[in-house]
Amino acid sequence: MIKKNLKTLIITSIIILLPIVAGLILWDKLPEKIPMHFNAQGEADGYGSRALAVFGMPLFMLAMQWICMAASSLDPKSKNITKKSINLVLWIIPAISLLVSGVVYAFSLGEEFNVGTVMVIFFGFFFIVIGNYLPKCKQSYTIGIKISWTLDSTENWNYTHRLAGKVWVIGGIVLIATAFFNLVWIYPSVFVIMVAVPFIGSYLFYKKESKK
C-alpha cells in the first residue's frame, strides 16, 4: 500500500511541513507565546511556545499521516481500499495542517477574525466531502463506519454508509449555514446526530437481518 502510494505520500508530507517554512520566515514577528487552543467562541484559551507552534504541530500532523498510511497497509481488507479512498485519506491531514497553522499564525500576528467561524466552515465542507464519498467506500478497517455488524455484512455496510452519507452532507450544510451566527449550542447537536443516526440505523438494520 505504501509503495503504491509513495509519490502521493511524499507530496502530501511536504505540504504538511510547509507551515514550518512559513513559521521560520515569520519567526521574528511571531510572539514568544502563541495561541494553540481556542474555545467555542473563538477566543484563545491555551498557549504554547513559538517553537511548539512552528515545529510541533506540523511534525505531529506528519506522524499522523504516516500512521494512517501504515494502518491502511495492515488492513486485512486493504484490497477494498481504492486509489480514490487512499487519496482522500492522504489529503485530509495536509489540509488540516495548512488551515490550523495558518489560523494560528494569522491570529498571533494580530489579524482580527473569528477563529470559530473559520473552523466551523472548514469542517462543514469537510463533512460534505466525506458524506458524498461514504456511500462509495467498500468494507475495510481503515475507512468508513467500522462496527462489528457493518464489517460482517455487506448489505449492512452499504445501507449504513448510504444513510451516513446523507446525514453528513446535511450536517455539513447546517454547519456552514450557521457558522456566522455563532450558535455554539447547535454544533454539538449536529455532531451527535451525525454519529447517532447512522449508528442507530445500522443497529436496527442488523436486528432486522438477525430475525430472518
Image (cartoon, rainbow, N blue to C red):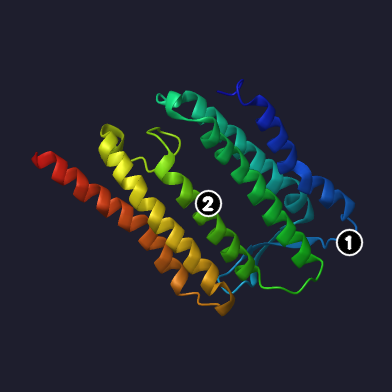
Labels 2 and 1: the sequence-earlier one: 1
Question: Please, is residue 70 above or below residue 24 in the view?
Answer: above
Q: Is residue 160 left or right of residue 104?
A: left
Q: Is residue 63 left or right of residue 162?
A: right
Dot 1 falls on a residue whose secondary structure is loop
At horizontal 68% and vertical 55% (from top left) the residue drawn is 99
Residue lying at the far left of the rendered structure: 211
The type of residue carrying mark 1 is: Lys
Which of 94 and 55 lies nearest the eye of the viewer?
Answer: 94
Q: Percent position (x, y) of residue 27? A: 87, 54
Which of 170 and 78 lies nearest the eye of the viewer?
Answer: 170
Residue lying at the far bottom of the rendered structure: 181
Q: Is residue 142 left or right of residue 193?
A: right
At horizontal 60% and vertical 60% (from top left) the residue drawn is 122
Q: Is residue 107 left or right of residue 96?
A: right
Mark number displayed over residue 129? 2
For label 1, the crowd category at 10 Å Cα-Cα, with few meaning under 14, some 14 to 19 and many 20 or more, is few
Q: CA distance from mark 2 to mark 1?
A: 36 Å
Dot 2 falls on a residue whose secondary structure is helix
| Residue 170, image quadrant | bottom left
Q: Percent position (x, y) of residue 82? A: 50, 30
Whether pointer 2 and pointer 1 mark residues with C-beta atoms closer than 8 Å, the reply is no
For label 2, the crowd category at 10 Å Cα-Cα, with few meaning under 14, some 14 to 19 and many 20 or more, is some
Residue position marked by numbered label 1 in the rendering: 29
The type of residue carrying mark 2 is: Val
